[in-house]
Image (cartoon, helix red, strand yellow):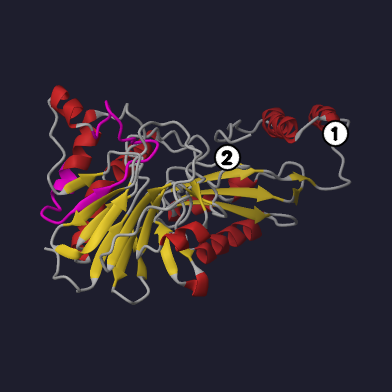
Amino acid sequence: MTGPAGAPLVLLQSSDWHVGSPLLFRSLGLPEELRASRREELDSVPERAVLAAIDIGADGILLPGDLWDSESVPPSTLHRVVEALSAFDPRPVFVAPGNHDFGGTGGFYDPLVLESLGMRAWPPNVFVFRSDEWTAMPFPGRPDVTVVGRAFLSSAVESRRPLAPPPTRPETPLALLLLHGSLEGYGGPDAPAGAKRTAPFSREELEGAGFSWAAVGHHHAFEVIEGRGATPLGAYAGSPVGRGLDETGPRSFVAVTLRHGEPPRVDRIASDPRSVWDLGLDAGGMEAPRLLEAARELLRTSGVAASDLVRITVSGRQPYGARPSAALEGLRSSIAHLTVRDRTSPVAGSKPDPATAEGRFAADLLARREQAADERSRRVIDLALSLGRDALAGRSVVPPAPEDL
């Protein structure tokens, strides 16, 4: 139950679940069984979020959008979201729909849609902002707290600045803001290119709004937004499960503790049973045993756990015929999944033997590589050279995992 007015307010914040999204993992080359496990780990995020909130004694949950990936999400997946959030009753859950789980008429936040499909309605402890204008809601059991939020009504990119002007700050001692949009200067790997941003806002605009805390969604990396004096203004919790090589490293829910007159306390709670890692290793001058040793050290210093999914890109110069992927086979027993991307190049100055078919083949492709117009073309030639030399030497021809070119 929520505490008395004036008591510390404990909140769990999460967003950008994207349950129901495609999990192709082309660049990681996950086998079917592991892809199925990863699907369950993604779609069970709602249950884990509620359990984490209960575990920390949260007074409420803040969800600033993109809980599912699109309106084509399977009904069974949506049902899991509804069921999980109902388990937090009677404590409140506040949702500000984003551009993926938009809150307009005809979407899954529309009670008429759920009724027409024969689905369970959103439970009474879930409060969804359904207007694209700022709206204030009371916090049940806490007259000293008000929540202000807004919704995306469609999946269209919104260029208007939601905090220019900002919403009126409620007069309650604690005022919470739920916002789905792009922070200017956000540095995560999913930062938008150029000037195109969804509902853009600045740190100065957020600080000027004067709210006690801003729960922000849309970007997928954890980031605390600080104002003057390094005071936390709000945060992106980031996506709670790594769905690909652009969502690497540990994932988390965010626990926020607010006391009137004091800076917010922000803690991270692990949200993903495994992490995705995209690591690089310079193999220049290393023979196979030394390369394997260096890779083990890379995993250790990076914090890779046994349950994790890893891609290692090997670069540097190696002798003709070297196979870094074969040299790193010894890593597979220590982690759940490994993909090795070979981006090595031949040792400078060495020449294939022109007296052999393999040498003539290599010389021809290397000449073509010198004339290649771009990196993609050079990479295709590198792959053809590697596989062709294996075939000519009578070795097993094992195509590498699909990769991003």
Tag of residue 370: 1
Residue drawn where x is 55% and y is 35% of the image: 401
Question: Start and end of the magenta stretch?
Answer: 83-109
Image vertical order of residue 285 relative to residue 342, above or below = below
Q: From the top left corner, tell me how far across and down residue 194 is, in percent.
A: 63, 42
Quadrant position of the C terminus in the picture: top right
Q: Residues within 10 Å of mark 1 (few under 14, many from 20)?
A: few
In the image, is residue 84 part of the stretch drawn in magenta? Answer: yes
Q: From the top left corner, tell me how far across and down residue 23 is, in percent.
A: 40, 35
Tag of residue 196: 2
Question: For numbered disc 1, what is the local secondary structure?
Answer: helix
| Badge nearest the viewer, 2 or 1 | 2
Give the left or right position of residue 351, taking residue 321 as reference.
right
Q: Amino acid at mark 2?
A: Lys
Give whichever of 389, 260 is nearer the camera: 260
Q: Amino acid at mark 1?
A: Glu
Q: Looking at the image, do the residues carrying marks 2 and 1 touch, with CB atoms under 8 Å apart? A: no
N-term mark: 2 or 1: 2
In the image, is residue 243 part of the stretch drawn in magenta? Answer: no
Residue drawn where x is 18% and y is 54% of the image: 92
Give the left or right position of residue 388, taking residue 183 as reference.
right
Residue drawn where x is 12% and y is 45% of the image: 124
